[in-house]
């Protein structure tokens, strides 16, 4: 059993975070995982899947970032005002400053294009993120 804490942060509905959590827990059912939504709808949707621990908002992100071993989510979680303004300066700062490994999914809806990455369906991006997280847990 891995005791590394995985924190998944998502907003804008939480569907990306839910898929990420579900796939991680499918491969590693004993993983210590917490989901945090930037809004209550995102948190609620993530908790409809396999994730059992969740919270909403800026302060839970700050607290979790201090304790996380791995932080995962869309790339926008590190960019102030990304995701339609849901990412506050504090959220972006706390995630950026965290000592956790960050596994970020490069979705262009955050208003950022990453050179050197190819366009891939979101499912493929999530699968790649899960692969990287599981590798870190092993």
Image (cartoon, helix red, strand yellow):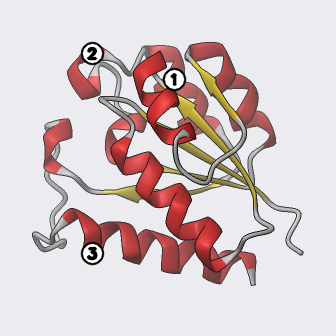
In the shown orientation, is residue 119 left or right of residue 60? left
| Residue at x-position 63% and y-position 83% | 135
Task: Tell me the mark number nearer the camera, choosing from 3 and 2.
Answer: 3
Of the numbered discs 3 and 2, the one sitting upstream in the chain is 2
Which labelled disc corresponds to residue 4?
none
Viewer-side label of 1, 3: 3
Q: Is residue 8 above or below residue 58?
A: below
Which residue is most to the front?
A: 48
Image coords of residue 49 (percent x, y): 53, 49
For the residue labelled by badge 3, is the local secondary structure a helix, a strand or a loop? helix
In which quadrant of the rendered image does the N terminus lie? bottom right
Name the quadrant containing residue 76. Answer: top left
Q: Identify the residue under disc 1.
A: 91
Q: Residue at x 27, y 27 (%)?
A: 82
Q: Which residue is under mark 2? A: 85
CA neighbours of label 3 inside 10 A, class few (<14), some (14 to 19), many (20+): few
Q: Which one is nearer the viewer's eye here, 45 or 91?
A: 45
Disc 3 target residue? 124
Q: Residue furthest left?
A: 119
Residue 75 lies, in percent from the top left, at 34, 46
Residue 61 or 18: which is nearer the viewer?
A: 18
At label 1, counting other C-alpha atoms closer than 10 Å, the crowd grade (few under 14, some 14-19, many 20 or more) is many
- Of labels 2 and 1, earlier in sequence is 2
50 displayed left or right of 43 = right
């Amino acid at each position: 059993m891995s005791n590394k804490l995985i924190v998944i942060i998502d907003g804008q509905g939480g569907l990306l975070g839910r898929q990420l959590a579900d796939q991680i827990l499918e491969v590693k059912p004993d993983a210590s995982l917490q989901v945090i939504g930037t809004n209550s709808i995102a948190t609620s949707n993530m908790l409809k899947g396999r994730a059992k621990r969740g919270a909403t908002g800026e302060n839970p992100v700050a607290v979790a970032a201090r304790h996380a071993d791995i932080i995962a989510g869309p790339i926008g979680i590190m960019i102030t005002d990304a995701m339609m303004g849901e990412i506050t300066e504090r959220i972006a700062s706390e995630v950026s400053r965290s000592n956790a490994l960050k596994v970020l999914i490069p979705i262009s809806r955050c208003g950022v294009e990453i050179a050197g990455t190819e366009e891939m369906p979101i499912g493929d991006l999530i699968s790649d993120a899960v692969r990287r997280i599981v590798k870190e847990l092993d």
